[in-house]
Image (cartoon, rainbow, N blue to C red):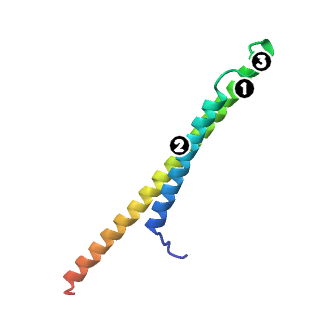
């Protein structure tokens, strides 16, 4: 098994890209919601009211689903950013430990 090599800069960059995608999706959903929820284009008669009610229910579910995707993307971005920070911190601690050992050995 090969040892795992992690580049914190790549992880941090991916975290930023994913967070940016989440923000874009959230903005797009807000714009879509504002567009499709304004007014009642199906009319106030019985068929328009029935269709409008079904449409609103489906639309609400779809917007909630996509909204949860925004939260998942933000969670993934946060996880990657935390991972990058942990790698940097572990590398720093390891470096300090090796320096300490080197000093104790008379180096």
Above or below 75: residue 88: below
Q: Which comes before the other along the chain, label 3 or label 1?
A: 3
Q: Nearer the viewer, residue 43 or 101?
A: 43
Return the residue at label 3: 48
Return the residue at label 2: 71
**Residue drawn at the location 32% of the way across and 69% of the way down:** 92
Label 1 Cα neighbours within 10 Å, binned few <14 / some 14-19 / many ≥20 = some
Return the residue at label 1: 55
Answer whether labels 1 and 2 touch (C-beta < 8 Å): no
The residues tagged by marks 2 and 3 sit, at their Cα atoms, a distance apart of: 34 Å
Question: Which of label 1 and label 2 is nearer to you?
Answer: 1
Task: Give the percent coordinates (x, y) of residue 106.
Answer: 19, 87
The residues tagged by marks 3 and 1 sit, at their Cα atoms, a distance apart of: 10 Å
Secondary element at tag 1: helix
Q: Is residue 34 left or right of residue 58?
A: left
Question: Which of label 3 and label 1 is nearer to you?
Answer: 3
Task: Give the percent coordinates (x, y) of residue 69.
Answer: 58, 43
Above or below 58: residue 73: below
The residues tagged by marks 1 and 2 sit, at their Cα atoms, a distance apart of: 24 Å
């Amino acid at each position: 098994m090969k040892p795992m090599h992690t580049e914190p800069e790549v992880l941090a960059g991916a975290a930023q890209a994913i967070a940016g995608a989440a923000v874009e999706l959230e903005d797009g959903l807000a714009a879509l919601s504002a567009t499709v929820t304004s007014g009642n284009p199906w009319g106030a008669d019985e068929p328009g009211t029935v269709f409008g009610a079904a449409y609103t229910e489906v639309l609400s579910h779809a917007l909630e689903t996509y909204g949860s995707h925004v939260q998942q993307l933000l969670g993934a971005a946060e996880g990657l950013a935390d991972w990058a920070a942990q790698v940097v911190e572990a590398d720093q601690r390891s470096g300090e430990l090796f320096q300490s050992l080197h000093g104790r050995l008379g180096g």
